[in-house]
Amino acid sequence: MNLTTIGVGIDLVEVARVTALLERHSMRAVQRLLTDEEREYCFSQAKPAVHVAARLAAKEAAFKALAPGGETAYLPWREFEVTRAADGVPSLRFHGKAQATATRLRVSSALLSLTHTTELASAIVILLAR
């Protein structure tokens, strides 16, 4: 099976900035940025800001990876969703215009890797086509 790389994106988010965002704007900002499932997961963790930061990094990395498809300036944050398999492995799901862009680019799979410390969260997204 031949796979072609369609796009690659990487991002780094400071946890302190997310902590300040959560303190300043509380759930209002998070509701705009995260899906219901993402919020539920993040706020079930001991340090929600770390997990929110990782998801924001993933969304920005996905946005960058889809850039070859154009029209990315109009993709809402919630159209990118970080999900978790039963074994805890993160994956990426597209919705709406993000899904339409991925379909147009013939994306067959999206690889996602997340990492974080107490200070930084990072994500890389690799989009592949058959």
Image (cartoon, rainbow, N blue to C red):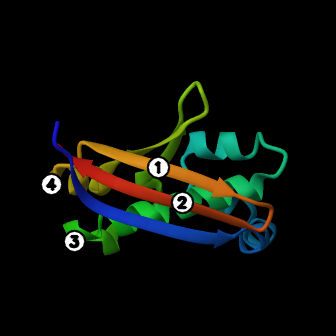
Distance Cα–Cα, label 3 vs label 4: 10 Å
Q: Secondary structure at mark 2?
A: strand
Pointer 1 residue: 112
Q: Secondary structure at mark 3?
A: loop
Q: Are marks 2 and 1 in contact (CB under 8 Å)?
A: yes
Return the residue nearer the eye: 100 or 26. 100
- Image spot of residue 9 (x, y percent): 41, 66
Q: Position of residue 61 (x, y in %)?
A: 45, 64
Regarding residue 81, the answer to whether it shows in the image is: yes
Between discs 4 and 2, the one toward the N terminus: 4
Query: Could you tell me the amino acid type at mark 4?
Result: Arg
Q: Nearer the viewer, mark 4 or mark 2?
A: 2
**Tags 3 and 1 touching, CB below 8 Å:** no
CA–CA distance in space, label 3 to label 1: 21 Å
> Viewer-nearest of labels 2 and 3?
2
Q: Quadrant of the C terminus?
A: top left
**Earlier residue among tags 2 and 3:** 3
Indicate the secondary structure of the residue bearing disc 1.
strand
Q: Which mark is residue 123?
A: 2
Q: CA distance from mark 2 to mark 1?
A: 7 Å
**Which mark sits nearer the N-terminus, 3 or 4?**
3
* Residue 89 occupies quadrant: top right
Can you tell which quarter of the image residue 104 is in? Answer: bottom left
Q: Which element is circle 4 on?
A: helix
